């Protein structure tokens, strides 16, 4: 970008909303992943959809790469400005525009974080279920079709989206949906832009479905002698239709980390963390039935927690797992990967993952939203050590291929970004050609988040 | 189409699988709607995806219009070959390819009907919830993103789709998804092709989510002094999060029809038909809570049915409503239209609909899947009477505009076809341009179901 182009961008948005400050450029060069950082040439902080429209129009005219940025909590390098250009930071667009209590809908700007939304909804007796762990922005969660611990009951991000305001690469401001619960009118643009990782336009407003806070909640922790028993218990719970709200697997090595962090003395064995939401009578019946299933699968210890405080403490361990690994391996970075398989293949997939981790000799653990057939591997690697990088790549390749052979997907919730791009051809075959046709048609100058997700050259 | 082209099509598929027989052409010229019929030049009955691929390739080469046909149970003229060409009838592709009991998945060909699927699933203790009333094909239901009475609990067609095999206009055979419960890999093609009404390609295989048959089911019929009270009761049920499985409104005039058909003596007043699925304890608590809500809203009579036989009888009345209207107005045809609004606008929308029906002086009624904010108007019109057609069109326009002003959609489940095309611009604004760009990119010769859904010229 030359000085003139840069100056023109500056004029298109509010005063002091563009910077080339080194520290800020640096902050926008990476996310929480191991992927190689790359500096943008400038960072812009738009305050309105109209500003975003002006910026994109000019970027399109000058073929300047644009990388949307939420909070940088992604795990596959989505926000890395791999081709330079400008980073568009949505942190100044953080209004909760409207809460439509009667319609169980909320309209927010993309920079609103999950915790900001939760706080606002609580006053109305409502909550938003999608919980990817990090306190991500709603814009980022929409762009990656995020999910998390509660998706087994409430669905993933795309299941909550009623409408998006999107600014297209040529600066048009469109709405992809409406406020009705369902529609058969026109192509489903909501679900096309959700999960498109900023490659088709910028999301500037999101209308989401929200839920009444459940009447009753019970959590549980159940220990098993082996991973097979734990996963088999989960598949039985899902197959028999128990409406479990969360079901997380934490493996042996990860339980050790939880014990260290939380000062607990949980038995060091594969463990399930579960949660149930419902009316009191139904929930009690679900819990009793689940306990039977857990015991049928050789569960050695199960504890139920109804109390809010102890329940929170139970989940704190699971949620802070990534932090505790990082804390315990100074000098190493965490590489997290995720795949998702049909539930019937889950036990063998996780056992295969555990074996591969040991084969590569990388410290780490396996955890996951196992009710969905989705698991994560956490690996602690020394990013400056080529051997470690190679091992991690080998691991990734092995579990992705294993998942694809079983009809699974290379990423259940983290997205493609830089890390999973190389697997799209194997996963989608000829359908990748259709995706490229769509990208070419909707972003002909390839200005939106180029170098990530999909290549069209 | 000249004789040579026709002959070539004939050679591309199995023997005796193409016809120009008048009766069969006639059968493929229309659906169950009031829309003007138009004959295809030939009807082809492919037996495999490979045959569909050959047919589409040649149609693309010769720019021959292709109209996919399931059973013709659509309500907006989707299968009318408005531009001539060939009708592609999928009734010979009716295999239930695979039931993956453990994964709660089923893979079917597009010609499988809902009742065929139900019968096959029952043996495994499973069921498929989407129930649009007609015994439609799964291919047709996917193409229109159908829904129906149970969508308030189980979601619409798109919520069940894991993977589609699609033949693109240039004859490629692609898969749009995978077997995992969730994925963040690539653009969401499942949801782009679902509801695309045959305008982007032909769906040749569908992998669907299925469910365990609910442990306990209770149905209910509740009578109200007025529509407002009935709808307000529904919105309260939905807003308080009772997981109701069906909730249908049947208005006064429609209850009269039910009484005639079923020889019942239901009170002639706005009536709700409800159903609850769940474990016994939870269901009982839901039912007790619902009864309180119904009474709070002035319900004058409520009857609960646990017995399977009487429950079936209760729903039979609702399901055969269209038939009874047709039977009662010989010489008239039924015109059915649907809109969907945010739940907070539902009462006023239905009252407005009832008023407009009376204003136009058309016999008919209002019924609907009110838990979704979706309602239908049934009008008995004399298709040869221009005045009747004009009245029906005026009615349609009035309720669509009313719905759009409230953030709703011009069709909740029937689709666009010929009937709702004229409202897409008002509903989608600039987003319609994006839809046209997608259509142009994926079907550049406009061979797939031209003249319907979207115009790209």
Image (cartoon, coloured by chain):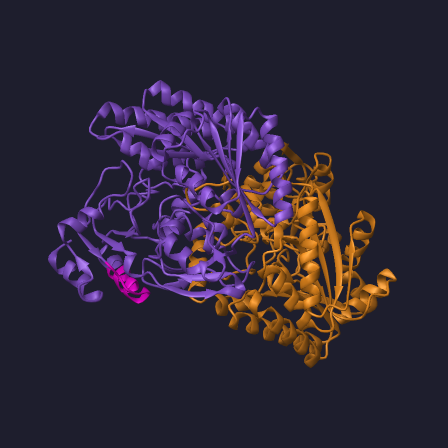
Chain colours: A purple, B orange
- Judge left or right: residue A254 versus residue B205: left
Decide whether residue A48 is among the magenta residues.
yes
Q: Position of residue B53 (x, y in %)?
A: 55, 40
Q: Position of residue B36 (x, y in %)?
A: 67, 65
- B352 relative to A63, above or below: below
- A32 relative to B29, above or below: above
Decide whether residue B169 is among the magenta residues.
no
Which residue is pictured at 68% across the width and 69% down the height? B297
- Judge left or right: residue B125 versus residue B186: right
Highlighted range, magenta: A45-58
Examine the rendering and report whether any part of residue A138 can be seen: no
Which residue is pictured at 45% across the width and 24% down the height? A269
Q: Quadrant of residue A175?
A: bottom left
Q: Position of residue B174 (x, y in %)?
A: 50, 39
Q: Nearer the viewer, residue A169 or A352?
A: A352
Q: Position of residue A400 (x, y in %)?
A: 41, 30
Q: Nearer the viewer, residue B82 or B353?
A: B353
- Judge left or right: residue A350 versus residue A457: right
């Amino acid at each position: 970008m030359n000085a003139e182009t840069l100056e023109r961008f500056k004029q298109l948005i509010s005063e002091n909303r563009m910077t080339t400050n080194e520290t800020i450029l640096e902050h926008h060069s990476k996310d929480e992943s191991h992927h190689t950082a790359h500096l943008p040439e400038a960072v812009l902080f738009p305050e309105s959809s109209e500003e975003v429209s002006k910026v994109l129009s000019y970027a399109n005219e000058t073929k300047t790469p644009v990388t949307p940025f939420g909070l940088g909590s992604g795990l596959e390098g989505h926000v890395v400005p791999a081709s330079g250009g400008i980073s568009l930071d949505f942190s100044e667009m953080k209004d909760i525009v409207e809460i439509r209590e009667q319609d169980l809908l909320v309209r927010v700007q993309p920079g609103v974080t999950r915790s900001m939304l939760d706080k606002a909804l609580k006053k109305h007796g409502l909550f938003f279920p999608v919980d990817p762990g990090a306190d991500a922005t709603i814009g980022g969660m929409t762009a990656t079709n995020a999910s998390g611990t509660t998706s087994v009951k409430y669905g993933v991000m795309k299941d909550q989206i009623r409408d998006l305001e999107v600014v297209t690469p040529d600066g048009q401001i469109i709405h992809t949906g409406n406020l009705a619960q369902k529609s058969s009118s026109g192509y489903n643009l909501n679900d096309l832009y959700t999960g498109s990782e900023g490659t088709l336009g910028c999301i500037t407003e999101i209308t989401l479905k929200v839920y009444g806070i459940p009447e009753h909640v019970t959590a549980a922790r159940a220990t098993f002698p082996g991973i097979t028993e734990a996963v088999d218990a989960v598949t039985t719970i899902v197959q028999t239709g128990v409406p479990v709200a969360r079901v997380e697997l934490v493996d042996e090595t990860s339980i050790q980390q939880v014990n260290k962090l939380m000062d607990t003395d949980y038995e060091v064995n594969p463990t399930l963390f579960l949660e149930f939401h419902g009316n009191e009578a139904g929930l009690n019946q679900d819990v009793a039935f689940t306990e039977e299933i857990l015991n049928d699968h050789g569960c050695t210890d199960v504890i139920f927690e109804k109390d809010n405080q102890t329940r929170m403490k139970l989940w704190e361990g699971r949620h802070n797992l990534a932090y505790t690994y990082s804390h315990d391996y100074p000098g190493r970075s965490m590489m997290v990967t995720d795949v998702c398989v049909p539930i019937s293949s889950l036990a063998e997939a996780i056992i295969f993952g555990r074996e591969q981790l040991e084969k590569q000799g990388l410290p780490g653990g396996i955890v996951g939203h196992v009710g969905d057939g989705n698991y994560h591997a956490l690996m602690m690697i020394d990013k400056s050590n080529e051997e470690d990088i190679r091992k991690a790549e080998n691991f990734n390749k092995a579990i992705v291929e294993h998942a694809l052979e079983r009809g699974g997907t290379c990423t259940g919730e983290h997205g493609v970004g830089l890390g999973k791009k190389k697997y799209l051809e194997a996963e989608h075959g000829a359908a990748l050609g259709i995706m490229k046709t769509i990208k070419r048609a909707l972003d002909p100058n390839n200005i939106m988040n180029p170098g990530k997700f999909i290549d069209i050259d």
